Amino acid sequence: SPILIAFDKTYFQNDLITNDILLNSVDGSDFNDGDITHKVKVQGHTIPLDSQNRVLNSGTYTVTYELTDNDKLTVTKTV
């Protein structure tokens, strides 16, 4: 199975949020495939954003990441 490493992050009101920003510091690997960080995807998040993808309110929210290896084994992690 792939290994997905992601930690809690802090964002503030008016911070810009994109998938690239959410994927920063997230790592993925697999025993057979090696480093597969490029395959990590943002499955979803609960961060309230305005029309310009900026954080509306301070608070605690979740981000769910997904990683699938070459054998089609998938792991998810919510932080």
Image (tube, grey):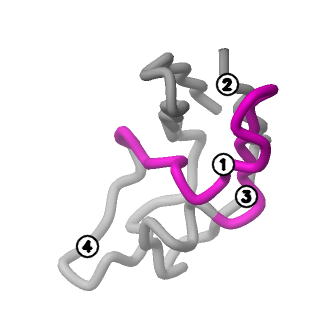
Q: Where 1 falls versus 8 (above or below)?
A: above
Q: Which mark is residue 13?
A: none
| Quarter of the image where the C terminus is located | top right
SS at badge 1: loop
Q: Secondary structure at mark 4?
A: loop
Q: Which residue is mark 4?
A: 50
* Magenta-drawn segment: 24-45
Could you say where residue 54 lies in the image, as x and y percent from the top left?
Answer: 39, 77
The residue tagged 3 is: 10
Counting residues from the start of the chain, the first of labels 1 and 2 encountered is 2
Kind of residue indicated by mark 4: Asp
From the viewer's perspective, tell me whether residue 12 is left or right of residue 44. right
Identify the residue at image location x=53%, y=34%.
Answer: 67
* Labelled pair 2, 4 in contact (Cβ < 8 Å): no
Quadrant, the N terminus: top right
Answer with mark 1 or mark 4, whichever residue precedes in sequence. Answer: 1
Label 2, on which residue? 2
Given residues 7 and 46, the one toward you in this image is 7
Which amino acid type is shown beneath numbered disc 2?
Pro
Mark 2 element type: loop
Q: Which amino acid type is marked by label 3? A: Thr
